[in-house]
Amino acid sequence: MIYISKRFERLIEKLKKIQNDVSSEVSEIINYFLKYFTLDYEKILWILRLENENKKEEIYKVADIVTRTLTTDFITLKGIIEFTNYCNKSCNYCGIRVQNNCIKRYRIPEEEILKIAKNGVKMGLTTIILQGGEDEYFSDETLERIIYKIHHEYKTSVSLSIGERSKEAYKRFKEAGASKVLLKHETINKKIFNEIHPDKDYEYRIELLDYLVYLGYITGSGNIIGLPGQTEKDIADDIIFMRDHRIKMIGMGPFISTHNTPLEGYPDGSADLTLNAYAATRLTIPYALMPATTALGTLKRDYQFKALRSGCNVIMVNITPDKYRKNYNIYDEKIKVEFYETAERILEEGLKLSPYTYRRILEAKRNGYSYERI
């Protein structure tokens, strides 16, 4: 039984209002969504396979209405600190895999991480994301201390994207103040997962995701769109998996072929299919936090902003100092999503920023963007 909230009542009104202006297929999807508050496998697959431009725009509009009505009517900016590009894993698509000897490795010192985070909060970011390879140099104790300081001293949310750590470690990080974890499953197709992860355990990845949900994290996962051998059916399975495992943050991005990896030379994933996946996911998991990913912006910069009208409600901006960032080459030609530039583009697109972020940007403008530029 679905609880009918005020927001859902407004959503019903808005979607009913546009039904006469959309195709019969999209109207049918609206009816199904309003009845079940999700989509079934066949409807997800239909959206993923959409090629007709008019129908794509219709379904993007539906997804956008759901986003603005049920989550927020503004875009949340979150700041990423890529604090280490060391990694002890061999993922076949990733440019910082342990076997890649063609990149300059770095670790940002703890005090510098804290300085970057503090500056990000001053700029107007409401979440600091600590992202890095699976690097045991940063002990659980060190990460626990960094998390505690960022959360308690700078009064901001802390999100982790650090791969597989022990269950005990993630419990400690939660107690220290981390509230979100992004641990992508990347594909629920076990055969493809094992092919791209020669030293990872499929069952443990799912078990760890479920444990993060159990601990009370706002748990994130996501898939890579366009992996070799992947089909639209696999992507539909990914979306159903995330819904059924109570994933609340969803990071979906296209595969990007990267030098010095076993998958170098494979074609990049489709930006258009990624947009379709965003819309399908929004209608399947309506309340999710869903970033318009940097990988999509790397393929097509304008599509990262188009995604904000297709179901996404977050952009992750990069506050890693350039001297480090240029070596965080998880895929080729990775763009820097800069804070002020991105915020201004969002406003130019007629979208809103979170009130706190907007106030801090106005203050920075009055001071000539006086905060330290990262």
Image (cartoon, grey):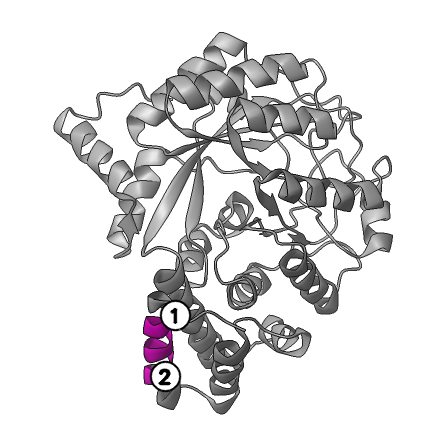
Indicate which disc residue 8 carries: 1
Q: Is residue 107 left or right of residue 359?
A: right
Decide whether residue 114 is among the magenta residues: no
Q: Residue at x 56, y 67 (%)?
A: 284
The residue that label 2 is drawn on is 16
Q: Quadrant of residue 57?
A: bottom left
Q: Of the residues shown, which amino acid type is indicated by label 2? A: Lys
Is any part of residue 105 visible from this angle?
A: no
Determine the CA span between mark 2 and mark 1. 12 Å
Towards the viewer: 211 or 368: 211
- Badge 2: residue crowd in 10 Å (few <14, some 14–19, many ≥20): some
The x and y percentages for residue 171 are 65, 28
Earlier sequence position, callout 2 versus callout 1: 1
Residue 346 lies, with reference to residue 62, above or below; the image says above
- Quarter of the image with the N terminus is bottom right
Q: Quadrant of residue 101?
A: top right
